[in-house]
Amino acid sequence: MRLLKTKSPLPELEDFTGDDIPLYAILSHTWGRDEISFQDIQDIQRGDTTLTKKAEYSKIANTRPWPPYTDSTYVWIDTFCV
């Protein structure tokens, strides 16, 4: 399972297997014309900041830092965690 860390300065994905999966929130949203993909997340991690200007990037940026009313430090978002 691939999850997005909510406590990192840039989008960062972490893979989990087996029974060692942490608590996570599932985020649902409407799909826009310029969604962030798994490849986009990898490119951002490599330093491509142009992708942070995509219209739908705000959905990702607004998950970090995660609201204080939850203990979850991970989220699952269908556009790139699948």
Image: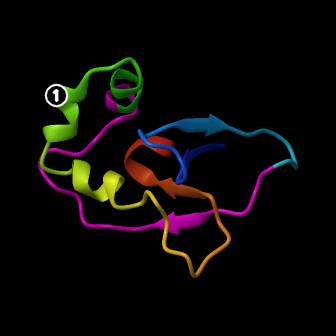
Q: Residues within 10 Å of mark 1 (few under 14, many from 20)?
A: few
Answer left or right for 32 relative to 81.
left
The answer to whether any part of residue 68 appears in the image is yes
Return the residue found at the far right. 19
The boundaries of the magenta stretch are 21-40
Label 1 sits on residue = 50
Return the residue found at the far bottom. 69
Quadrant of the image containing the N terminus? top right
Q: Horizontal and vertical percent for residue 53?
A: 14, 40
The amino acid sitting under disc 1 is: Thr
What residue is rendered at 40% in x and 68% in y?
Answer: 28
Answer left or right for 30 relative to 50.
right
Answer left or right for 11 relative to 36.
right
Answer left or right for 66 relative to 74.
left
State whether residue 18 is above or below residue 39.
below
State whether residue 36 is above or below residue 48.
below
Q: Nearer the viewer, residue 63 or 77?
A: 63
The answer to whether any part of residue 82 appears in the image is no
